[in-house]
Amino acid sequence: MMMRNRKTVGFLAVAAALLLGACASQMEPAQKAIAGVESAVNAAAPDAGKYIPDQLAAVQKKLADLKTSFDNKDYATVLSSAPGVLTDAQGLLGAAMLKKDEVVKAMSAQWPALAASLPGLVTSVTNKVNALAKMKHAPAGVDVAAAKSSIADAGSLWSKAQAAFAAGNIEEAVGTANDVKAKAEAAAAAIKMTLPKPAPAPAAK
C-alpha cells in the first residue's frame, strides 16, 4: 500500500511539473500575442477614436479580455483568441480611413454654401451691432456688448476657416465655419436681429 501511495505521489508530482512546464512555455507567446494586439490598437486609436469609436471600443474590450485571461494564467485562451482580435485590431485603421473619406466628402459638399453665405451674414450683423453701439441708449433687452464680442469672434474664426480650407484641411474649415455661423447667430440674438431664413438646398438630380 505504501509503495502504491509513493507511486501515486510520484505520478502527481510529474504531472504537476509537466503542467507547470506547459504553462511556462505558453506564457511568453501569450505575452507577445497581447503585445501585438495592443500595438495594432494603439496605432489605429487616434483615427479610429474619431471616426469609428464604437468599433474601437469593441476591440479594446476584446484586448482587455485577453489581458484578464493572461492575468488568470489562462494562456491557452489568450493564444487561441489573440489571432482573431489582432485581425480586428488591424482592420480598425482601414475602417477609420473609409469613414474619414465619407466625412470629408460630405464636408466638401457643405463648404461652398458656407463660403457663399457666411461673409454676408457676418457683415450684416456687424453693421447692425456697430449702428446700435453708436446709440446713446440701446433698445430694451438688447445686449450690445455681448453681440460685439460674439461677432468679433465670428470674424476671427472666419479667417481661421478660410486658412484651413486653403491648407486643404476641409474638416477644420467646415467645423470652424459652423462655429462662425453659431457666433453670428448668437450676436444677432443678443441684439434681437431677425436673420433671413437660409435658402433651401437644391433638389438632388
Image (spheres, rainbow, N blue to C red):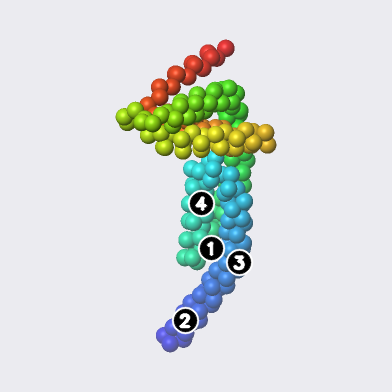
The residues bearing labels 1 and 2 have C-alpha atoms spaced at a distance of: 27 Å
Task: Give the answer, above or below, for where 35 lies relative to 128.
Answer: below
x and y, in percent, of residue 56 in the image: 52, 46
Identify the residue shown where x is 49% and y is 16%.
199
Identify residue type, mark 4: Gln
Pick the quarter of the image with the N terminus.
bottom left
Secondary element at tag 1: helix
> 84 and 116: which one is in front?
116
**Residue linked to disc 1:** 75
> Label 3: few (<14), some or many (≥20) within 10 Å?
few
> Label 1: few (<14), some or many (≥20) within 10 Å?
many
Identify the residue shown where x is 67% and y is 33%.
166
Task: First in sequence, mark 3 or 1: give its number.
Answer: 3
**Residue linked to disc 4:** 60
Q: Which mark's residue is nearer the viewer, 4 or 2? A: 4
Task: First in sequence, mark 4 or 1: give its number.
Answer: 4
Identify residue type, mark 3: Glu
**Residue linked to disc 3:** 28
Res. 136 in view: yes
